[in-house]
Amino acid sequence: MREIIARTRTFRRFFQNEAVSIETLHELVDLGRLGGSARNGQPWQYMIINTPELCDKVFPFLGWAGYLSDWKGPEEGERPSAYILCMLNTNWLKGPETEAQFDLGVATQNMLLGAMEARIGGCRIGMFNPKLSELFHLPDHLQISLVVALGRPRETVLLEECRTDSDIKYWRDDEGAHHVPKRSLESCLITLEAR
Ligand SMILES: Cc1cc2nc3c(=O)[nH]c(=O)nc-3n(C[C@H](O)[C@H](O)[C@H](O)COP(=O)(O)O)c2cc1C
């Protein structure tokens, strides 16, 4: 478990010509739908995009790696070969939307873990242009909340420990490896006196 969790990193460069099969994509949504859900409301629906034509249409709406200011996102040839659009079905909402967003975190982590097991990597994208919705004839009760980009990874991602509290920005070295600082276990643990 630890090994697969550690390997399940965010990947942003892929072998664009290698398709992700519809069977794999269905399996990932299936893993997502098994996740925990506040009030068991399960208010999410998922649209699979896996044709090069539709991938080309979705790509321009996506925002990539805000901390890598001189990188505008993956080049042609290294773009994702599939996407899962995560849509909130407001007809199925049972509580506040914040609860639903927690559910989506759980669901997409299941998807990315399952993807990694199949040697597929991904990136959750919350920073997308809301006009993405206009690409599709979305009924009023569906709202795109997150895009999961997927493909066979074409980059090395390395975990490291944050050196200071504010050292959380991921960065890329001269060889192109992507480094992700994580807070240490010690700094994540907190003990407070009970009154
Ligand atoms: C809810 C959520 C939204 C995210 N949105 C974006 C995004 O819009 N663009 C992007 O390049 N990465 C996005 N990421 C990826 C994070 O930048 C990434 O998880 C973080 O750098 C840590 O790397 P790791 O996933 O390998 O641990 C998002 C991640 C999460 C969980």
Image (spheres, rainbow, N blue to C red):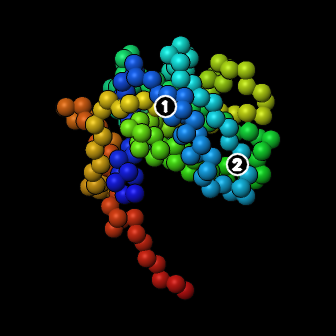
Q: The N terminus appears in which quarter of the rendering? A: bottom left
Name the spot of residue 188 as percent of width and height, x first: 40, 64
Which element type, helix, strand or loop, lies under badge 2? Answer: loop
Name the spot of residue 158 as percent of width and height, x first: 28, 44
Decide which of tag 2 and tag 1 comes sooner along the chain: 2
**Residue farthest front in this picture:** 23
Q: Which mark is residue 42?
A: 2
Name the spot of residue 113 as percent of width and height, x first: 45, 46
Give above or below for 186 relative to 141.
Answer: below
Name the spot of residue 115 as percent of width and height, x first: 45, 40
**Residue farthest top in this picture:** 53
Say whether residue 177 is left or right of residue 30.
left
| Residue at the spot of label 1 | 149
Residue type at mark 2 is Gln
Which element type, helix, strand or loop, lies under badge 1? Answer: strand
* Mark 1 residue crowding within 10 angstroms, few (<14) / some (14–19) / many (20+): many
Give above or below for 97 relative to 126.
Answer: below
* Mark 2 residue crowding within 10 angstroms, few (<14) / some (14–19) / many (20+): many
Separation (CA) of disc 2 from disc 1: 22 Å
Q: Is mark 1 within 8 Å of ligand 1?
A: no
Q: Residue at x 73, y 58 (%)?
A: 39
Say whether residue 3 is left or right of residue 51.
left
Q: Residue at x 42, y 29 (%)?
A: 151
Q: The C terminus appears in which quarter of the rendering? A: bottom right
Residue 69 appearing in the image: no
Residue 51 appearing in the image: yes
Residue type at mark 1 is Ala
Q: Quadrant of ligand 1?
A: top left
